[in-house]
Image: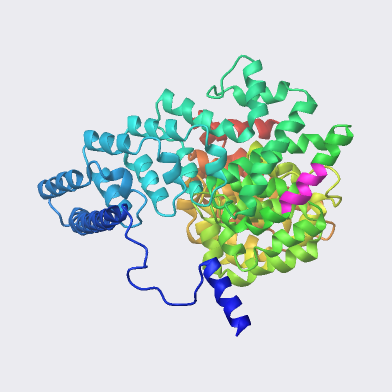
Amino acid sequence: MAEEKRDSMALKATGMTGKKRSLSDKKKPSKFSPKKKKKEGGKDMRLSKRNAAIEEIERVTLEAKKLSAQVLQKTAKSDQRKENVTELFLLLKGKVRNLAMKHDLCRTIQCCFRFGTDDQKQSILKELKDEIVTLCKGKYSCFMIVAFLRHGSTQHRLFVLKEIKGHMKRLGTHNCGAHVADLALQTTSHDTKQLKSLRTSLWNEFYGQRFAIAVANAGLDLSNSKALKCYDDIDLKTKLAILTDLKQVVLKIADKGLLRYAYAQRLSYEFICKTEPLRSIESEDAQKFYSSSVSSLVPLISEASLAMISTSEGTKCICRTLALSGAKEKKKLIKKWKGHINNISIHEYGYLAIVTALNTTDDTVLLKKFIISELVKERSSEEVLACILDPTGIGRKLYLYLLVSQDKLPRYFSPTEIKVMTPVEGTSKKDPDMRRSELNKQMKDILESCCIENVEQIASDKKGSDVLLHVLSRWWNEDVSKSIVKMVENNMKELLEHPTAQVTIKRAVNIEKEHLEHVENKSDYNMGSEIWKLMKPSVKAWLSINRASFVINSLLEHPETASDVRSSLLKHDNVMKKHEGLASIKVIRKNLKA
């Protein structure tokens, strides 16, 4: 009992009696409790306002989508379209900034900008001022900025380009921003001086801050077209620093898979062109930078090679990559083209990559397996003929490369093409003509058969006739020469008066003449003799035709027909005097006196 009393006294002392509190003992309401009710009322008000805003956005979205669908209809009349665009503009006005990042509404803004008036376009751009760079990085809004550049006037493009000025490195290396960067750097024939200089300034931003300082020290601005020329006058240490900045940008672009864009391909090509001279500089730092750059960039370019062939700069980049690479890197790159060789070889730019691979790779077994064999198997005789007669000249470039010797390449390839396809010293050891002779054996049968079957068509084509003559020159084939004689026999008058066909016949006779000079065992069949037999009965008539007379002159120089042609011409000296004004007769008379 005494213990229970002590416990109860202790509980009383601490205020913990163990009894339940009555309602009267509960804490009285605070004087701040009325404000709690006000807070709850404020929360409801905010929710109602938020719901109203959401409803308003939903209403605007539905109406904007309906209007934009009507505007985009191909059958829509111009007056009705203008009304719908005006209504759409008024609906979006003042809300463009808030709606631009929404994936569905940014398309309606694009539609409004595309078909709107200049004032409406300017109003949209003003609302988006200071937000252009952010919108460039949006998954959907980036296409809206592309639409601004594509459908805007010069002033609208200037507005957008000025907004993204100073941010090109970030946009160029961003997955979404790359869309905008690519179009922003594309020049057109309608660009004003201001637009050109602004685009030049944007391009030079990729070279980094150190390059900008070097240009400023030279007294120029990044917008000056001569800014890049300052690079040549900079010392080696600064060059390496600038190239290090550029390398980081190029590698970042390549790592993100952005080499499909034209600006990325051009930037890669410029980097390789500026890195290549370091190979010959006797400096440890330069050599280290060169080797590390090639080893890191070549695999990335190999992965994107099929996409890069679509542009001139991209193809040149691949060509120089092949020229700089070792045997292993070349093999990896060529293997990437498997199954696409036929399409690449007739592409506007791609043919140069194939020719460069043939010109720089010593492994002829690899080339036969992945390039030559694919061309032979996949091309029918009709496709081979189409390539030979291609009016652009691209289709036959590969055949001409395989047929002509190295010293005759300038006749069919421009100095720029030859420069691009030339291997770097030390990367290729095999003689080019030896490599060519090993490669073209597989092409022999298909080219000869095509020339025999379509001899008249090819001989009458100004450019295609070169393929026929080089086939005859490289592999002298009696079947090809017989087909030429048969062609003359079937249609002699038309062919000897044809501006191209008569030249082809004349050159074929000259090729046979050179062939006979280097052959000990001469064949019984002679093309020149057969053509002369066809022309001899009507030689008097042929001497009155300038073009036909040039063929007679080539037969006069032919060892197998020279004596017979000479005696026949001397008998018709009066005819030659009558037509002595013709250029061909002057040449014949000169040869007769010799």
Occupied quadrant, residue 358: bottom right
What residue do we see at 32% from left, 43% from top?
Answer: 97
Q: Please name whichever residue, 583 or 478, is drawn nearer the observer in this view of the structure.
A: 478
Image coordinates of residue 438 in percent, x first then y, are: 79, 61
Can residue 341 be seen by looking at this rendering? yes
Quadrant placement of the N terminus: bottom right
Q: Please name whichever residue, 28 or 164, is drawn nearer the observer in this view of the structure.
A: 28
Q: Please name whichever residue, 271 or 2, is drawn nearer the observer in this view of the structure.
A: 2
Image coordinates of residue 111 in percent, x first then y, are: 26, 49
- In the displayed orientation, state which residue is furthest to the front: 2
- In the displayed orientation, state which residue is furthest to the top: 219
The segment highlighted magenta reads 290-298
Quadrant placement of the C terminus: top right
- In the displayed orientation, state which residue is furthest to the bottom: 1
In the visual, does 249 lie left or right of 174? right
In the visual, does 388 lie left or right of 191? right
Residue 384, above or below 251: below
What residue do we see at 57% from left, 49% from top?
Answer: 349
Q: Please name whichever residue, 494 or 295, is drawn nearer the observer in this view of the structure.
A: 295
